[in-house]
Amino acid sequence: MSSPSKRREMDLMKLMMSDYKVEMINDGMQEFYVHFHGPSDSPYHGGVWRIRVELPDAYPYKSPSIGFVNKIYHPNVDEMSGSVCLDVINQTWSPMFDLVNVFEVFLPQLLLYPNPSDPLNGEAAALMMRDRTAYEQRVKEYCEKYAKPEDVGAAPEEKSSDEEELSEDEYDSSDEAVAGQADP
């Protein structure tokens, strides 16, 4: 391929034509979200994460930046920022890899085989080494709480105030509290 921009376009199109939902962040092809499902043979099964991908100008010669938008409990993912500690992406990236590799190989491998000796989430690493069953239970709790399919719809910082409206029951009860009961 002659130029990084052509390769970027080709890799992005290949990812879009696969089974992944891709949402562009802006008009360029350098920032986008990908919906990623947890591997089936793992405690992450059933979870869906929104992954933010940023392609550097030098892509594919320089690795993409990958981060989880919704929370995940994992020794190699920073719980607050969603940053991924992944050697293949961060240090051993090669132009032979493409975006589909990230979502079909690298991220599933990360979730299936966490490395607690190189943690970004020290608590998750310690729990995994101390009590594997409790660790897997915590992973499942996070999946249930933060990684349901409806959780990938909007990034937390993108929610508008009208998405935080009261439910119908809360709305009805709060009206009565403000206005009082109607006269008979």
Image (spheres, rainbow, N blue to C red):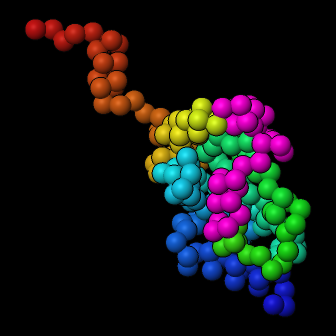
Find residue 159 and report its image quarter: top right
Q: Where residue 42 appears, x then y in whole percent?
A: 56, 51
Left-right relation of 155 to 123: left
Instruction: Note whether residue 104 is visible.
Output: yes
How far from the left and from the top, in percent, is residue 72?
63, 43
Q: Residue at x 35, y 13 (%)?
A: 178
Q: Is residue 163 left or right of residue 132?
A: left
Q: How many marks?
A: 0
Q: Which residue is at a point 76% across and 62% down the rendered structure image?
A: 54
Q: Residue at x 52, y 72 (%)?
A: 19
Residue 124 appears in the figure: no
State the image coordinates of residue 112 (x, y, percent, origin top left).
65, 54
Extreme-left residue of the structure: 184
- Highlighted magenta segment, given as a residue range: 103-131
Q: Is residue 114 magenta?
A: yes
Q: Quadrant of residue 128?
A: top right
In the image, residue 178 sits, relative to residue 71, either above or below, namely above
State yes or no: residue 121 in magenta: yes
* Quadrant in the picture for the C terminus: top left
Residue 108 horizontal side relative to residue 161, left or right: right
Magenta segment, principal secondary structure?
helix
Please state, as top left, top right, bottom left or bottom right, where the N terminus lies in the image.
bottom right
